Image (spheres, rainbow, N blue to C red):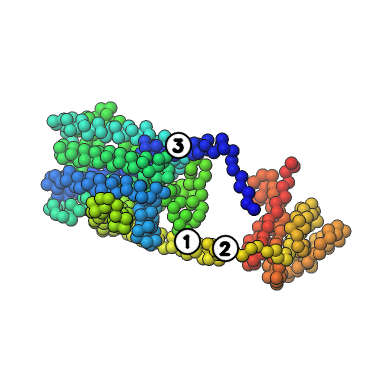
Amino acid sequence: MTTTIHPPESEAPARASRGERHRLTVVGGLAALSLDAMASVAYGPEAIVLVLALAGGTGLGFTLPVTLSIATLLVVLTASYRQVIAAFPDGGGAYGVARRYLGRRASLAAGASLIIDYVLNVAVSVAAGVAALTSAFPVLLPGTVWLCLGVLAVLTAINLRGIAHSARAFVLPTVVYVGAIVVVVLAGLVRSEPAIDPNTAAQQAGTLQSVGILLLLKAFANGCAALTGVEAIANAVPSFRKPRVRRAQTAELVLGGLLAVMLIGIAALIEKFAIRPVPGVTVLSQVTEASLGDGFGYYLVQFATVVLLALAANTSFGGLPVLAQLLAKDNNLPHAFALRADRSVHRHGIAFLTVTSAALLVLADGQMNSLVPLFAIGVFVGFTLSQVGMVRHWIADRPRGWVGKTALNGFGALLTGIAAIVVTASKFGEGGWLIAVALPVLVLLMEAVHRSYQHIGTRLELGHRPTPPRPVKSLVVVPVATVSRLTRDAIAAGLSLGGKVIAVHVGHPDDAEQAAFLSAWEDWDPGVPMVRLHDERHRLAAPLVEYLQAVRDLQVFVLIPEVEPDHAWQRVLQNQRGAILAHALRRRTNVIVCRMRFRTRST
């Protein structure tokens, strides 16, 4: 007979309403999950210009065409991920697609690439924000690492309060930033000449390169850094309010539209005002000066950019915990990552992201330039696997219009595959080899976790109906060291379990306290037999383990009595006998270990 206790009917809707309140709206989704992509406007166009400048003015003339090709890829990715959202409402993005259509190994590669990208995004975004701060206030430069860790701690604290809470905190900075960039683009387009002539005094050192396909491919690959974060919304569909799919698709569409407008607008202004890379001055800064001058508008754009770069890390805090939850449910990560706390927070995923990002920041000494070469390599692996998986999805299901959708995703897979190869090759010697090594290592680790869960499942006979339970003869063993109320309560608990109960005392014949204990035991006479175990080496656990290993045909319970102190700090006062015995018994025997807590606090 099974008894199920339901909450009162009046509480269920209220509880559901509270749960939805901690999820994302469309605006909240953009603020919580798209800051990485939004902030990439600050470094994506500059990455293109830095490569094309190697060919001088002729090369810079290809800034807009290269950006348009990236915007085309952005349109393909946006359309694809809207389909991914509909096909995989549980989230997971590239991982979910690859798992269903490309096999488990490919799905692990997609999951590993996303994990790496999420961690690097946090480290790069925090380091970039702090770099902007220390540039404005050089006196803070010696504390770069501590500033990075401080920003990371603030982001972690905000996200531990719930993703919806973090979204509300980031809505205003996001709106200010997007609005400022749009104003820069519009003001620049209507100007016949720049408000302030851009500084073009810097000359290219060395021989100018010719504009060839390799240079254009490298510029395209560098500029594709602006596409990192496009997949985050598809990875975190469960974080949205109902109807989740429609809200997530709308957020994905708005993100793609805003990002395309900002990227193309900035590229058009770069060509219009003949912007060139200048040491110590960002391309976005030059474009802003040319459009708005050097007044309040200029400083507003710079400040908003600094804030968005620092907050762009929040994309990872929204996406990685959900991805880790899916990996854990599929037995590829420890099941702790699937646990959800209050406010729909996956604390273990957030903790993992914080610890790994902090380690990277410390190892890189908080320097953004040390981390950037590692950035955006893994994400293209996920992009490509997602596109290929969606091609197989359309071919397998063949819905209306499947030919066009297949062609779209196939073209996207080709573009992202080329970008993945070019980005990895161009950045391999700059630290990209670390990602090339880390990705397969992470896949192998997840394979090991999966094999371990498979072995445990086999031993537990999961999926098979067990035989009916039958009682067996049992033996309850109570280790004793003194005659006290603790000993009395432990033996009473053992007698309550049923079966045979014995007390076991481990000692040494020469111990001065041995005779006193035996005398007290005989005077007390609790009515259960006592087994005395001796060890010449004064060991505590080994004699008991050897004794229990010799017991046959009985279900053995070992009931270990322990004092539960009033305060946590008082644990250091304990002799740890219980912990030592429990550890040894669990490792070397098959007995059932029970640790009985005796509370010293009066009730």
Q: Secondary structure at mark 1?
A: helix
Q: Is residue 137 left or right of residue 588?
A: left
- Left or right side of 268 for 489: right
Name which residue type carries label 3. Answer: His
For badge 2, the amino acid type reads: Arg
Q: Residues within 10 Å of mark 3 (few under 14, many from 20)?
A: some
**Residue 288, horizontal then vertical, whole percent:** 23, 34
Residue at x-position 18% and y-position 42%: 276
**Which dot marks residue 449?**
1
Q: Name the residue located 50 percent from the left edge and 55 percent from the top edge.
A: 335
Q: Tell me the number on the disc at residue 165.
A: 3
Q: Is residue 205 above or below residue 509?
A: above
**2 and 1 marks in contact (CB < 8 Å):** no
Camera sees residue 427: no
Tell us which disc is closer to us: 2 or 1. 2
Q: Residues within 10 Å of mark 1 (few under 14, many from 20)?
A: some
The foreground one among 179 and 507 is: 179
Work out how far the residue at label 2 is from the one at label 3, CA to CA, in angstroms: 44 Å
From what the image shows, is residue 261 above or below residue 465?
Answer: above
Instruction: Decide: few, some or many residues near mark 2? Use Cα within 10 Å; few <14, some 14-19, many ≥20.
Output: few
Checking the image for residue 465, the label placed there is: 2
Q: Nearer the viewer, residue 549 or 95?
A: 95
Rendered location of residue 403, percent (x, y)? 24, 53
Question: Is the C terminus in the top left, top right, bottom left or bottom right quadrant?
Answer: top right
Horizontal and vertical percent for residue 340? 50, 46
Earlier residue among tags 2 and 1: 1
Q: Residue at x 19, y 45 (%)?
A: 68
Q: Are marks 2 and 3 in contact (CB under 8 Å)?
A: no
The residue mark sitting in front, 2 or 3, is: 2
What is the quadrant of residue 99 in the picture?
Answer: bottom left
The tag earlier along the polypeptide, 2 or 3, is 3
